[in-house]
Image (cartoon, rainbow, N blue to C red):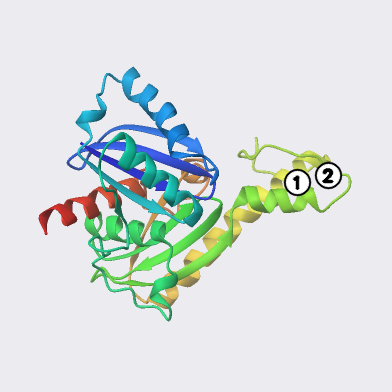
Amino acid sequence: MLLAIDAGNTNVVFALFEGRTLKARWRIATDPRRTGDEYAVWLMQLLSIQGISRDAVTQIIVSTVVPRALHNIEVLARNYFHIEPLVAGQAPVDYGIDIDVDQPSSLGADRAVNAIAASAKYAGDIIVVDFGTATTFDVVDFNGAYKGGIIAPGINLSLDALVGNTAMLPRIAIRAPSDSSVIGRNTEDQMLIGVFWGYVAMMEGLIARMRAQIGRPAKVIATGGLAVLFDEVTDIFDAVDADLTLEGLAILAERATAK
């Protein structure tokens, strides 16, 4: 089995694959100080609950946008699975796609892996919207080349900035407003309307501009934790694909094995 590990700014996701079939998925808060031993204690318990032996894991691949977390994940792989992990974007796991931007080396591993998975699963031009700590919009053309994108603050990051830089505004939970009114009658409702519907308007506006610049029909694929929430209030997405990044890692691992 393949253990795919996606280390993001907020969470590290561990997923088990048989081929390209996702069998299990777990997440833990990202903390660069977390040691390989700590990862092992947590992960071995979860494997045991699922009735899976550590010996069943024969390959490990890692994607990370948190360089400080990589070393401890590599320690986990080497000390507890006795496997040299593959790292997305590093030989022999080159992305294998044309990254047609000014600084290809600056592209985050998660965005490259999303582009690989999207190109493999969906035909034509694609816009991938990934809702994470930041919200990213990435364009993959009909040839599978990564053409560029947009980085915007994630909605929770925007809310944190609003609350953290004002004296009297309360912390609220992100959710869809209970009705379609955009005129709030109290402070909490006004904040929720501003953050939530403002974010939807930003997202729809940027996607419309991107489609116009592409000049051809482009599918919009949403992924990340808040994709389902926004899918309930907009018809801008052609598909919601929660496991796009993990599936991209499975594709990369499969290609590396075939070499």
Determine contact: label 1, label 2, CB under 8 Å. yes
Residue at figure coordinates x 48%, y 64% from the top left:
207
Q: Which element is circle 1 on? A: helix
The residue where tag 2 is placed is 169
Q: Label 1 neighbourhood size at 10 Å, few (<14), some (14-19), many (20+)?
A: many
Kindly report the distance in space between the C-alpha atoms of the residues bearing marks 1 and 2. Answer: 8 Å
The dot on residue 159 is none
Q: Earlier in the sequence, mark 1 or mark 2?
A: 2
The answer to whether 180 appears left or right of 140 in the picture is right
155, above or below 217, in the image: above
Residue closest to the far right = 167
| Quarter of the C terminus within the rendering | bottom left
The residue where tag 1 is placed is 191
Q: Amino acid at mark 2?
A: Leu
Q: Is residue 28 visible?
A: yes
Out of 200 and 148, give the one closest to the viewer: 148
Locate residue 189: give its quadrant.
top right
Residue at figure coordinates x 52%, y 40% from the top left:
34
x, y (%) of residue 11?
A: 50, 42
x, y (%) of residue 159?
A: 70, 49
x, y (%) of residue 148?
A: 42, 72
Residue at figure coordinates x 64%, y 43% from the top left:
180
